[in-house]
Amino acid sequence: MTVTDELTHYLKEFRLPTIRANYEMIAKEAVQESLSYEQFLLIMLREEYEQRTQNKVQRFLRESKLPLEKTLANLDLKRLPQKVRQQISTLTEGVFLDHTENILVFGSPGTGKTHLLCAIAHELIRRGKRVLFSRCDLLVQELLIAKKNLELAKILKRFAKFDAILIDDIGYVQQSREEMEVLFTLLADRYEQASVMISSNLPFSQWDTIFKSAITAAAAVDRLVHHSIILELNIPSFRMISAKSGGVA
């Protein structure tokens, strides 16, 4: 077995595919540039690390189910309230996740609530955090099916692996009491354990219409706001402005 064959064998066994693919080219460059053994080793390990990081980000992005187009680069920051703009850079750093804080975004339909939360989520994934995106109605149906199949505990355990769950449009579609009970179960399960990111067009004062019970609504709000960052988008609808200007809604 040649040195190259043996190197390839060990790199394959140690699961270092990037080094295995590039070490010969890097070795030639190291000789040409008279690099030390330590510098050569550092370059190889750095490339392996960077590739693994990129792969992890792509894997987390796929599992997140986030809309790919709703990124920070595509977000019109100038239209957001100044207070919200000032908070975005801090939120994208992900410190709130370390404190199991929640992000709650309120505003009328069309004000960019979903895009704002998704943009933050994309940045969190780039920092190695796991985020799951779901419309509230679809998430509730998934939880309800799990409950009927006696697998609610199982799905809650799966959700617990995510640093944040982004629940979009809570209250937008009216649900039954049974459906809201499983949503409350999820919120209670994550309380002080992991973060949620929620968008809603209804203020807290109207959440009894969501949970079909003033008591349940109060309990849900209490858990959410205990450790939370609240963003209010008191701005005109993007879609309405676009329609008036002849753009695409």
Image (cartoon, rainbow, N blue to C red):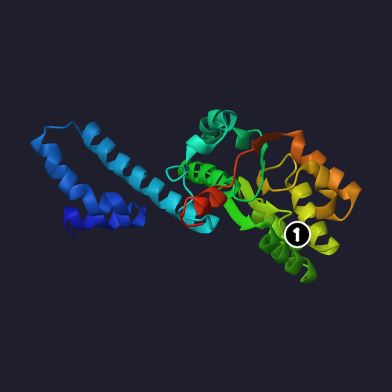
Packing grade of label 1 (10 A; few <14, some 14-19, many >=20) is: some
Residue occupying image coordinates x 74% and y 69%: 145
Q: Amino acid at mark 1?
A: Ala
Residue occupying image coordinates x 48% and y 58%: 62
Q: Which residue has dot 1 on it?
A: 153
Q: Horizontal and vertical percent for residue 248?
A: 47, 57
Q: Horizontal and vertical percent for residue 193?
A: 71, 42
Residue occupying image coordinates x 66% and y 52%: 167
Q: Quick one: 244 or 86, which is closer to the camera?
A: 244
Left or right: 104, with 74 as reference point:
right
Q: Horizontal and vertical percent for residue 67?
A: 51, 56
Q: Secondary structure at mark 1?
A: helix
Extreme residue toward the left, this view = 32
Number of marks drawn: 1
Relative to 147, residue 23 above or below: above
Residue occupying image coordinates x 11% and y 32%: 34
Q: Quick one: 118 or 245, which is closer to the camera?
A: 245
Q: Quadrant of the N terminus?
A: bottom left
Relative to 126, residue 63 above or below: below
Q: Horizontal and vertical percent for residue 190?
A: 72, 46
Q: Quick one: 227 or 108, which is closer to the camera?
A: 108
Relative to 24, residue 227 above or below: above
The image quarter containing residue 30 is top left
